[in-house]
Image (spheres, rainbow, N blue to C red):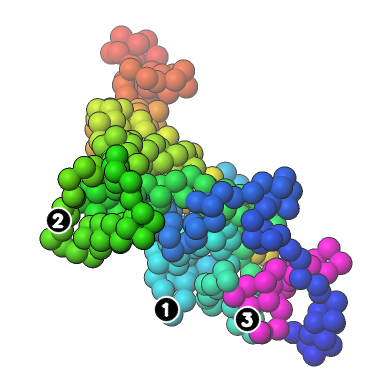
Amino acid sequence: MSNLFTAAVQNLVTPQLRSGLTDGNSWPFFGFKLTEAGKKVNTHSALTVSAFYCAVNTIANSFALLPHSVMKTTGKTRAHFTDHPADYLLYREPNSQMTAFTFKFIMAVSVLMKGNAYALIIRDNSGNIISYQFLAHDDVSVLESNGKLFYKYKNQVPYSAAEIIHVPGFSFDGITGKSVIHHAADNMGVSLAAQKFGSDSLADRGISQGVIETELAVKPDAKKRISDAWTAALSSGNKHRAAVLDEGFKYKSLVLSPSESKFIETYAASIEDIARWFQIPSYKLHIKGEGGYNFIVQLSIEYVQSAVMPFAEKFKQELERKSFTASERKSGVYIFQNFKKLLQADPAARGQFYKDLVFVRAITPNEIRELEDMNPEDGGDEFLQMSNLLNESQIKKMISAEPKDKKQVKDEN
């Protein structure tokens, strides 16, 4: 980037308000306001809710498990393009600090928790990609000038959009995204409040706020002394607590006990809300009592389709757009994501799937062995043919290849 270009960018670009609330409390589009419970939710407090942590960790792990390979189509054939530098980076080691799994995992976490994921594309003097460097969300500013986007990382010179992999989450403008926490803050606040209520109740051993009733007349200073003595005797800091009431005094609780308020049900309801926010089956959050084996298998497929595939496709298209030149894309270079990796938990279904492919001559035995990480065997590169499934040309070929009977041979001679 030349000095002239650098000066032009620094003078022209103006930061756009794309990444948050206008005043910390209301949405710029619809004027929504967070409740007091919602205002207490942030990336750190949200992760203290086990269901939220589980949802983020599950989706990020699923995406990180997806193998990414660079492929190239020539006519109707497809081949693994191992010579492309991006193939090794995406499959093995995108940079010197991370494995491919870690890189994809942290990108997914950044989108889910922050709303955006950024990575810098580093190229050599020949233009070949040599690494993808993850950039922390809070250190990146999105800038716009004359309809073009630029990205400023910390105090460095702004990068052009072609140099940055940017995967947004839920978005109103198609450029920057909003995290799940922004939209689910109130639900998360209820869950955190339920957790705190439970912990406070346990700390107080079920003793809640209340009043001391009496039919006797009590002066104001006496009331204060009684209240202070009661509070000191039953404060949560005292492990062994006991209070003695004088004759004629009775204690009456003002709030419901944990069992009466059913805060556990409230917490369970918030877990279901979290599952809906992330579009994942609730069994993924380890809620008991949901379906049998076949039902879980179907839910696993639905989970991949609704929670993982849309995010993976967004990541894939951004990688293809920024990693490959226009000529490479036109020549048929693309990124392949192997979702079979996420659907290998059911061996019976996988076996039937392979049988169906063999039945229609769509796959060879050695191709199956390769998918199962097994070595090839002799003769395994040929398609298997079912004898009762021959097309017309194959039948004619077999008839013409049959030996003629002796009488026909004699008549011809």
Residue indicated by mark 3: 154
Which mark, by number, is residue 242?
2
Residue 135 percent location from the top left of the image: 55, 73
**Rendered-image quadrant of the C terminus:** top left
Question: How far, Cα to Cα, is label 3 from label 2?
Answer: 57 Å
**Residue at left 29%, top 39%?**
215
Classify 344 as above or below 80. above
Mark with earlier residue (3, 1): 1
Residue in front for this viewpoint, 139 or 76: 139
In terms of secondary structure, where does tag 3 sit? loop
Amino acid bearing label 2: Ala
Say if the magenta span includes residue 316.
Answer: no
**Residue at left 24%, top 49%?**
207
**Residue at left 66%, top 84%?**
155
Residue range corresponding to the magenta coloring: 139-162
**Residue at left 83%, top 63%?**
147
Residue indicated by mark 1: 97
Mark 2 closeness class: few <14, some 14–19, many ≥20 residues within 10 Å? few
